[in-house]
Image (cartoon, rainbow, N blue to C red):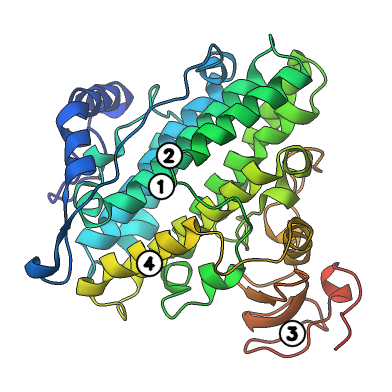
């Protein structure tokens, strides 16, 4: 299986097109046993060999249920994209870690073009074993890798439950509660189900490095995350199987529309579940919060790996620290679920790619510059300043802070001092 080709060819599972790509996927799956052992029992790299330690986290499979893999059967056009997303995340981390001096074009052009022109149009039919792609990154931070995998299993099983036409609303709610309890049974790898402040994601010393250096690839990741949470909404609001199919098809088409003129047509802010999929977030708020925390940590890991100010010897420690903070229920918290919803609203749905259902044909016009950083009052969720970037309206804030005109951004009146 060719993961990286130094002869000038594209980085991809195989060089001979879609059929060979699937043979490459097969190789990855056949390598599952020993590579999984490598990820789970890997000797964690630290600043010095004397500081190394054994990793004690372990892998775990699906919660046993009859609804497992229903989504793959009923919505293959969406489900297969998740396999492509797994490849995109994995190759991103591996490239950032193993090629720190590479030109930005390696990700912004070579990898981006391969993903958007070949992988996304013809995604793998089966999930990939990510450790076969992110070999060195998995050794660097196996704890973070397992946190992502455990949350991705939660994603997959939540789709399955909501897609199962044999279950009525009450049965789906009961199964989702069982799934959430199963997810929480792993405190060593679960994300907190309490909302985290955006300060943890984008106001750390290493923050913003990735979105600044790789705006197209960053926008692609935000597009991934928009679709991952957005595809819940058709399953919740659709009244019949046919309607859920039609809405899901439209949501996937919307995601592809975001890729037309990158990064202009991509989300300008990290998509928040309460804004993109409000019906799902209202019905299952803990799951929605977990997914927001998951997606925030994806950004954090990208920033740590992309930021040269974080020495290579310190990257593992920073990633492990971030994982601990995203797991706990005490640090960097937004005060309440209502404050989390307010924070999501003030970030602006128009800046996240728009809602997942009920949208107009044209993409929404963002009201902030790409990658802008809004600062929020964690007790209320209300936006209080712009830390980076600016509002695009005539009365918007400028980079470096200052009073924010919420009315100009469509968020309601500016809060009183």
Label 2 crowding class (10 Å Cα cut-off): few <14, some 14-19, many 20+?
many
Query: Which residue position is annotated with label 4?
Result: 321
Label 2 and label 1: CA atoms lie apart by 7 Å
Secondary structure found at label 4: helix
What percent of the width, then of the height, locates residue 302?
39, 62
The answer to which of 310 and 223 lies nearer the viewer is 310
For the point 78% across and 70% down, the residue is: 380
Q: Are marks 2 and 1 in contact (CB under 8 Å)?
A: yes
Query: Which residue position is annotated with label 1?
Result: 189
Query: Which residue position is annotated with label 2?
Result: 150
What percent of the width, then of the height, locates residue 360?
81, 43
Label 2 and label 3: CA atoms lie apart by 39 Å
| Image side of residue 69 versus residue 49, left or right | right
The first of marks 4 and 2 along the sequence is 2
Secondary structure found at label 3: loop
Q: Are marks 4 and 1 in contact (CB under 8 Å)?
A: no
Query: Which residue position is annotated with label 3?
Result: 397
């Amino acid at each position: 299986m060719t993961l990286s080709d130094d002869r000038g060819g594209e980085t991809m599972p195989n060089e001979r097109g879609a059929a060979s790509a699937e043979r490459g996927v097969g190789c990855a799956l056949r390598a599952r046993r020993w590579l999984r052992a490598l990820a789970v029992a890997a000797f964690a790299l630290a600043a010095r060999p004397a500081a190394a330690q054994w990793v004690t986290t372990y892998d775990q499979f699906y919660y046993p249920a009859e609804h497992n893999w229903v989504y793959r059967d009923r919505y293959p056009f969406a489900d297969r994209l998740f396999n492509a997303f797994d490849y995109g995340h994995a190759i991103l981390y591996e490239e950032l870690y193993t090629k720190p001096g590479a030109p930005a074009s390696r990700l912004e052009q070579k990898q981006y073009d391969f993903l958007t022109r070949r992988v996304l149009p013809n995604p793998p039919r089966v999930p990939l074993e990510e450790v076969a792609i992110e070999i060195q990154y998995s050794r660097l931070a196996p704890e973070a890798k397992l946190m992502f995998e455990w949350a991705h299993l939660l994603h997959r099983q939540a789709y399955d439950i909501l897609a199962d036409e044999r279950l009525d609303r009450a049965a789906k709610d009961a199964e989702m509660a069982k799934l959430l309890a199963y997810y929480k049974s792993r405190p060593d790898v679960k994300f907190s189900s309490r909302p985290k402040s955006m300060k943890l994601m984008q106001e750390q010393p290493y923050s913003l490095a990735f979105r600044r250096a790789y705006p197209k690839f960053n926008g692609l990741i935000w597009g991934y995350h928009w679709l991952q949470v957005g595809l819940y909404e058709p399953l919740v609001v659709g009244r019949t199987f046919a309607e859920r199919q039609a809405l899901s098809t439209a949501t996937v088409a919307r995601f592809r529309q975001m890729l037309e003129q990158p990064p202009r047509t991509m989300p300008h802010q990290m998509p928040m579940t309460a804004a993109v999929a409000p019906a799902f977030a209202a019905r299952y708020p803990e799951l929605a919060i977990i997914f927001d925390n998951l997606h925030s940590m994806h950004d954090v890991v990208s920033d740590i790996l992309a930021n040269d100010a974080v020495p290579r010897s310190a990257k593992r420690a920073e990633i492990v620290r971030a994982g601990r903070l995203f797991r706990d229920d005490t640090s960097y918290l937004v005060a309440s679920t209502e404050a989390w919803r307010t924070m999501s609203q003030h970030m602006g749905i128009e800046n996240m790619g728009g809602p997942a259902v009920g949208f107009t044909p044209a993409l929404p016009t963002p009201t902030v510059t790409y990658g802008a950083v809004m600062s929020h009052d964690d007790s209320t969720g209300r936006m209080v300043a712009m830390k980076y970037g600016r509002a695009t309206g005539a009365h918007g804030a400028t980079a470096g802070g200052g009073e924010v005109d919420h009315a100009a951004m469509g968020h309601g009146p500016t809060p009183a001092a």
